[in-house]
Image (cartoon, grey):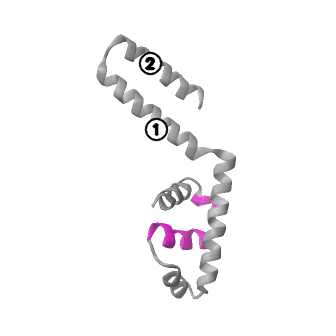
Amino acid sequence: MKDIYKSSLLYDFYGELLTQHQKEIYEDFILNDLSLGEIAIERGISRQGVHDLIKRCDKILNGYEEKLHLIQRFSKTKDDVEQICQLADSKDADSVAKIKVIAQEILDNY
């Protein structure tokens, strides 16, 4: 399950950088949950061809993340915003100071 989630995130962030053919097959496998055999029959290619293309797409998308770190930054920002929301509920002076620190860190990273 975790691999599907990671693959979906990679596709959400970097999918537009794949070719149309790669996007269609990767979407069928990851987002539409079709089997390799179903995709192969639908596309008129071999099951092994579908498998190879999906592995190649995974490698390409992971390569983009290794270079750009967009998902890593997104996750960090999401965690920071969740922390801000929790601190905002307490409404004390110490929490306000922590919110300002976290908010400034977010701004400094962008």
Hey, which quadrant is residue 61 in on the image? Answer: bottom right
Q: Looking at this rendering, what residue extends furthest in the top direction?
A: 93
Task: Write the residue at 57% across / 68% down.
Answer: 23
Query: Which class describes the residues within 10 Å of circle 1: few (<14), some (14-19), or many (20+)?
Result: few
Residue 78 — which label? Answer: 1
N-terminal label among 2 and 1: 1
Q: Quadrant of the N terminus?
A: bottom left
Residue 47 image point, x, y percent: 58, 84
Q: Would residue 64 be found to the left or right of residue 43 on screen?
A: right
- Up the image or down, 83 lies above or below 59; here it is above
Q: Which residue is mark 2?
A: 98
Write down the region rendered in magenta: 15-32
Residue 10 image point, x, y percent: 56, 56
Whether 34 is among the magenta residues is: no
User: Cβ–Cβ below 8 Å for labels 2 and 1?
Assistant: no
Task: Write the residue at 51% across / 41% down.
Answer: 75
Q: Quadrant of the C terminus?
A: top right
Residue 1 — which label? Answer: none
All told, the count of numbered labels is: 2
Q: Secondary structure at mark 1?
A: helix
What's the amino acid at mark 1?
Lys
Task: Write the residue at 49% across / 67% down.
Answer: 30
The answer, for residue 19, to whether it is visible in the render is no
- Up the image or down, 107 lies above or below 9; here it is above
What's the amino acid at mark 2?
Lys
Residue 59 image point, x, y percent: 66, 62
Q: Main secondary structure of the magenta part?
A: helix
Query: Which class describes the residues within 10 Å of circle 2: few (<14), some (14-19), or many (20+)?
Result: some
Q: Secondary structure at mark 2?
A: helix
Task: Write the residue at 52% across / 88% down.
Answer: 41
The answer, for residue 98, to whether it is visible in the render is yes
